[in-house]
């Protein structure tokens, strides 16, 4: 496999950066495959729930679709907890950073804030403020995030809920993550 000639970026040649650009293009194109693998890994993630984190993610996406959500929100529901393994104290922001280049700003804000908004349903049981989200009550996407958490996230721990498999959502995920990053036609 070809490699660059430099050990410092400022010493790279046009040929070095042409090589890296070609490799990066292929790497970016494989993002959906890496995301699918990361979702599959959630099947062996945080324990203690009646269902796996993968099943929770699939159930969230299934609920979003059943509720009439658009493709961007369905994929957001699917990946919303991808950050649990690598950023357990900051999982919402990690998921938002992953999807940000491919969706409208509202979807990114929902993912970024869902960790705070979901506290409404459990924070009082662990000595935290369940109304922490209220500081964003006047935000234009408050109701959207509230709906995401109330209807699709916090309810998605039911082992008996008829949940669609990852293979069902794969075309949605591939569609979103194959878009040009920061496409002005999509991103607001």
Image: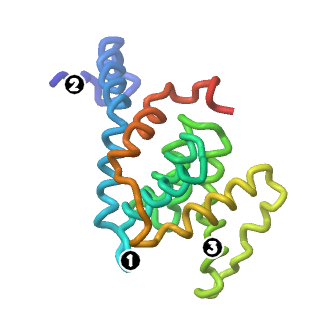
Q: Mark 3 and mark 1: span between their CA atoms?
A: 19 Å
Residue nearer the viewer, 91 or 62: 62
| Residue 148 picture location, percent across and down | 62, 58
Quarter of the figure that contains the C terminus: top right
**Could you tell me which secondary element the residue under label 3 belongs to?**
helix
Looking at the rendered structure, which numbered label has been put on residue 65?
A: none
Q: Left or right: 154 with respect to 129?
A: left
Task: Estimate how packed mark 1 is, as few (under 14), some (14 to 19) or many (20 or more) residues with alpha carbons within 10 Å.
Answer: few
- Mark 3 or mark 1: whose residue is earlier in sequence: 1
| Residue 103 picture location, percent across and down | 58, 37
Residue nearer the viewer, 24 or 117: 117
Q: Mark 2 and mark 3: span between their CA atoms?
A: 48 Å
Query: Which mark's residue is nearer the viewer, 3 or 1?
Result: 1
Q: Left or right: 183 with respect to 34?
A: right
- Mark 1 or mark 2: whose residue is earlier in sequence: 2
Task: Estimate how packed mark 2 is, as few (under 14), some (14 to 19) or many (20 or more) residues with alpha carbons within 10 Å.
Answer: few
- Mark 2 or mark 3: whose residue is earlier in sequence: 2
The residue indicated by pointer 2 is 3
Give the residue at x 46% y 71%.
157
The residue indicated by pointer 1 is 50
Above or below 137: residue 176: above
Task: Estimate how packed mark 3 is, as few (under 14), some (14 to 19) or many (20 or more) residues with alpha carbons within 10 Å.
Answer: many
**Could you tell me which secondary element the residue under label 1 belongs to?**
loop
The residue indicated by pointer 3 is 119
């Amino acid at each position: 496999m070809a490699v660059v000639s430099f050990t410092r970026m400022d010493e790279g040649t046009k040929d070095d950066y042409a090589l890296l650009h070609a490799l990066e293009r292929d790497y970016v194109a494989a993002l959906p495959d890496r995301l699918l693998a990361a979702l599959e890994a959630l099947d062996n993630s945080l324990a203690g729930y009646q269902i796996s984190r993968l099943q929770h993610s699939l159930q969230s996406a299934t609920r979003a679709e059943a509720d009439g959500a658009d493709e961007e929100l369905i994929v957001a529901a699917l990946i919303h907890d991808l950050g649990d393994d690598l950023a357990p104290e900051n999982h919402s922001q990690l998921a938002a950073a992953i999807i940000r280049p491919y969706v409208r700003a509202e979807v990114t804000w929902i993912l970024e804030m869902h960790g705070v908004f979901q506290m409404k349903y459990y924070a009082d049981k662990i000595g935290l403020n369940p109304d922490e989200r209220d500081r964003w009550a006047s935000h234009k996407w408050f109701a959207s995030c509230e709906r995401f958490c109330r209807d699709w996230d916090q309810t998605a721990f039911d082992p008996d809920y008829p949940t669609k498999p990852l293979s069902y959502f794969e075309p949605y995920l591939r569609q979103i993550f194959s878009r040009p990053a920061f496409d002005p036609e999509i991103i607001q």
